Image (tube, grey):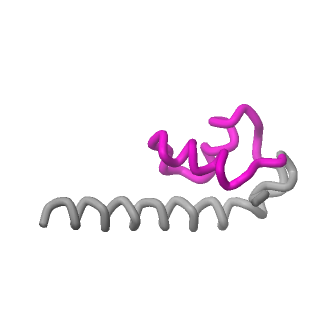
Amino acid sequence: MYVCICNALTDCQINEVIDGGERDATAVHPGLGCSTRCGKCLPTIADMMEARQQSVGADLAMAAE
């Protein structure tokens, strides 16, 4: 699914950057070799980051049991 229409960035591309350790939504674009244009995708990227962090946190909690 396209998340950033201006740069044609998909959720898969963005998840790769998130999985690589990025925690700042505004740093995703430079991490993919482009720049933020209109910025309408930033809330979605931030939500994606939060969801990934919650998922990782749940995985770690389950592993600790």
Label tally: 0
Residue under the image location 75 percent in, 59 percent down = 3
Which region of the structure is painted magenta?
A: 8-36
Residue at image location 63% in from the left, 36% down from the top: 31
Q: Is residue 60 left or right of residue 50?
A: left
Whole-percent x and y of residue 22? 50, 44
Most extreme residue toward the left, as rendered?
A: 65
The question of residue 9 being in magenta is answered with yes
Whole-percent x, y for residue 27 in the image: 60, 43
Quarter of the image with the N terminus in it: bottom right
Most extreme residue toward the right, as rendered? 6
Q: Reply yes or no: does residue 40 show up in magenta.
A: no
Quadrant of residue 28 within the rendered picture: top right
Closer-to-camera residue (25/63): 63
Left or right side of 42 for 55:
left
Residue 42, percent from left and from top: 68, 60
Residue in the picture at 14% in, 61% down: 64
Q: Identify the image quadrant of the C terminus.
A: bottom left
Instruction: Point out the residue furthest to the top here.
Output: 33
Left or right: where 27 falls relative to 10: left
Residue at image position (48%, 40%) is: 20
Whole-percent x, y for residue 63 in the image = 20, 60
